[in-house]
Image: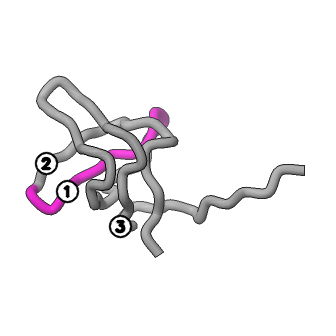
């Protein structure tokens, strides 16, 4: 039996990155506080407090803050 330890992540949730999240323009370092702006077929879209955004980051790059 599989028991999930993850809380459900929804659009608008505040999360923290658990690994380096990269794109061509830059990256979010491990431990960056981000907000989930969208959930698509290829993963979460994330934005930081400075307005930087990376889309389609996959499913295993963030952890929901309690």
Which class describes the residues within 10 Å of circle 1: few (<14), some (14-19), or many (20+)?
A: some
Callout 1–callout 2 Cβ contact below 8 Å: yes
Which class describes the residues within 10 Å of circle 3: few (<14), some (14-19), or many (20+)?
A: many
Dot 3: element:
strand
Task: From the viewer's perspective, tell me whether residue 16 is left or right of residue 50.
Answer: right
Task: From the viewer's perspective, tell me whether residue 4 is left or right of residue 7.
Answer: right
Extreme-left residue of the structure:
50
Disc ID at residue 52: 2
Q: CA distance from mark 3 to mark 2?
A: 15 Å
The relative height of residue 1 versus residue 11 in the rendered view (above or below) is above
Q: Earlier in the sequence, mark 3 or mark 1?
A: 3
Q: Look at the image and say whether residue 33 sits in the magenta stretch.
A: no
Rendered location of residue 60, percent (x, y): 50, 42
The relative height of residue 40 versus residue 26 in the rendered view (above or below) is below
Which class describes the residues within 10 Å of circle 2: few (<14), some (14-19), or many (20+)?
A: few
- What's the colour scheme? one colour
Q: Nearer the viewer, residue 65 or 56?
A: 65
Q: Which residue does the numbered mark 3 point to in the structure image?
A: 14
Dot 1: element:
loop
**Residue under the point 50% across and 60% down:** 9
Q: CA distance from mark 1 to mark 2?
A: 6 Å
Disc ID at residue 48: 1
Rendered location of residue 44, percent (x, y): 40, 45
The relative height of residue 16 versus residue 12 in the rendered view (above or below) is above
């Amino acid at each position: 039996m599989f028991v999930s330890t993850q809380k459900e992540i929804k659009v608008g949730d505040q999360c923290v990155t658990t690994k380096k999240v990269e794109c061509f323009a830059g990256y979010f370092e491990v431990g960056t506080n981000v907000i989930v702006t969208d959930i698509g077929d290829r993963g979460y879209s994330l934005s930081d407090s400075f307005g930087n955004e990376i889309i389609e980051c996959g499913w295993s790059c963030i952890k929901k803050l309690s």
